[in-house]
Image (cartoon, rainbow, N blue to C red):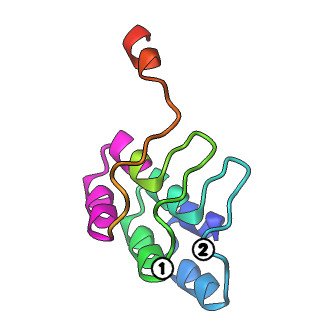
Amino acid sequence: LHDACLKGDLNAVKEIINDGASLNERDEYGDTAMHTSCRYGHAGVTRILISARGNGNVQNKNGDTPLHIAVSLKLRKITNLLIRAGVNISTLNYVSVVGWLVG
């Protein structure tokens, strides 16, 4: 599922979901398929994952949710999809504010 989301292959994503794939399975970075679809800017794939009840509130190893990724990459369409789907907009990640101030 992660590979299909990375490639933005809508048909493969639908087929894999229909075959019973776990939508919230994590990779070695703690990313779910939704993190991957957001990171690569695939709004259509993100929409499918939301419709299939993928969890948009899962945090990866950095504490990032799919929303953190979409916002950091300035992906407005995906950001709006996630917000309309009801993801938690108050979740904090593990990035220190000090790093942004000093860096």
Q: Is residue 17 above or below residue 81?
A: below
N-terminal of the two: label 1 or label 2? 2
Q: Position of residue 37 (x, y in %)?
A: 49, 61
Q: Position of residue 25 (x, y in %)?
A: 67, 67
- Using residue 92 as the reference point, say whether residue 5 is left or right of it: right
- Residue 11 in view (yes/no): yes
- Residue 40 in view (yes/no): no
Magenta stretch, main secondary structure, is helix
Q: Is residue 41 above or below residue 99?
A: below
Task: Please state, as top left, top right, bottom left or bottom right, where the N terminus lies in the image.
Answer: bottom right
Contact check, label 1 and label 2, Cβ < 8 Å = yes
Q: Residue at x 61, y 54 (%)?
A: 31
Q: Is residue 80 magenta?
A: yes
- Using residue 90 as the reference point, say whether residue 4 is left or right of it: right
From this viewpoint, which residue is outermost toward the right? 28
Which span of residues is magenta-colored?
Answer: 69-85
Q: Residue at x 43, y 41 (%)?
A: 92
Q: Which residue is mark 1?
A: 53
**Dot 2: what SS?**
loop
Q: Name which residue type carries label 1.
A: Arg
- Please give the label number shown on residue 9: none
**Dot 1: what SS?**
loop
Q: Which residue is mark 2?
A: 23
